[in-house]
Amino acid sequence: IGLEVARNEGILALMKGSDIFAVKRVFDWSTRYYFSEVFEMMMLKYGAGVNGVLSPAEKIIASLLAGTVSTFMTLPLDVIVAKAQDAKKAGVKVSALETFLQDYKQGGWKGLYDANMMGFEVRLVHVCCTTVVMQFGSPLMFEILFNRNK
């Protein structure tokens, strides 16, 4: 399919829609990492941890809190991107801003909220779990595999 698209529309056609998707990914992961650090620093500031080091359970809690905040911040963008991609599949060229404004026009603030918080619970579980894996599980596996404590 990719070769056919490149042949008919040019090589840049393969990148259609990747700009908003890339922005979404950067925003999504940067908020997860940023808020993990924020919650870890807050926990240390308010007495958690021993000698400036959080326990594994405290690190997991910080990651879960970060995933929750990240979900609230990024879910509307995820929904807008998904709607824009669906419109493009149907042959309609629409921007993320147009999609956002259309939701507002159709239902006001409540409609905007309802439209952009679809799938919140599932997204919350996904973001929290992947944040814990990346912030806690990855360093743990690194320690196990490379035995840095020796």
Image: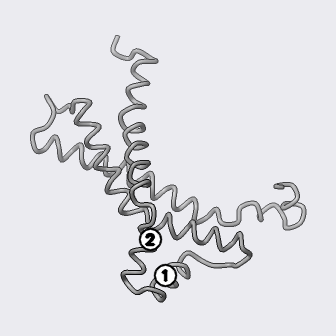
Q: Amino acid at mark 2?
A: Asn
Q: Residue 66: give x, y in percent of width and height.
A: 31, 50
Please identify the residue farthest to the top as the structure is shown.
Answer: 150
**In this view, 55 is above or below 109:** above
Crowd tier of the residue under label 1, counting other residues whose Cα lies within 10 Å: few below 14, some 14–19, many 20 or above = many
The residue labelled by disc 2 is 116
Q: Residue 54: give x, y in percent of width and height.
A: 21, 33
Give the quarter of the figure containing the C terminus: top left
Q: Residue 67: give x, y in percent of width and height.
A: 35, 50
Give the quarter of the figure containing the N terminus: bottom right
Crowd tier of the residue under label 2, counting other residues whose Cα lies within 10 Å: few below 14, some 14–19, many 20 or above = some
Badge 2 element: helix
CA gap, disc 1 and disc 2: 9 Å
Please identify the residue farthest to the bottom as the structure is shown.
Answer: 105
First along the sequence among labels 1 and 2: 1
Which quadrant holds residue 99?
Answer: bottom right
Q: Which sits in the foreground, 125 or 2?
A: 125
Please identify the residue farthest to the left as the structure is shown.
Answer: 47
Q: Amino acid at mark 1?
A: Asp
| Left or right: where 61 falls relative to 52 | right
Residue occupying image coordinates x 42% and y 38%: 134
| Left or right: where 38 falls relative to 145 | left
Badge 1 element: helix
Q: Which mark is residue 45?
A: none
Q: Residue 15: give x, y in percent of width and height.
A: 71, 61
Residue occupying image coordinates x 29% and y 46%: 37
The residue labelled by disc 1 is 103
**In this view, 77 is above or below 148:** below
Residue occupying image coordinates x 81% and y 60%: 11
Is the Cβ of the residue at disc 1 closer than 8 Å to that at disc 2?
Answer: yes
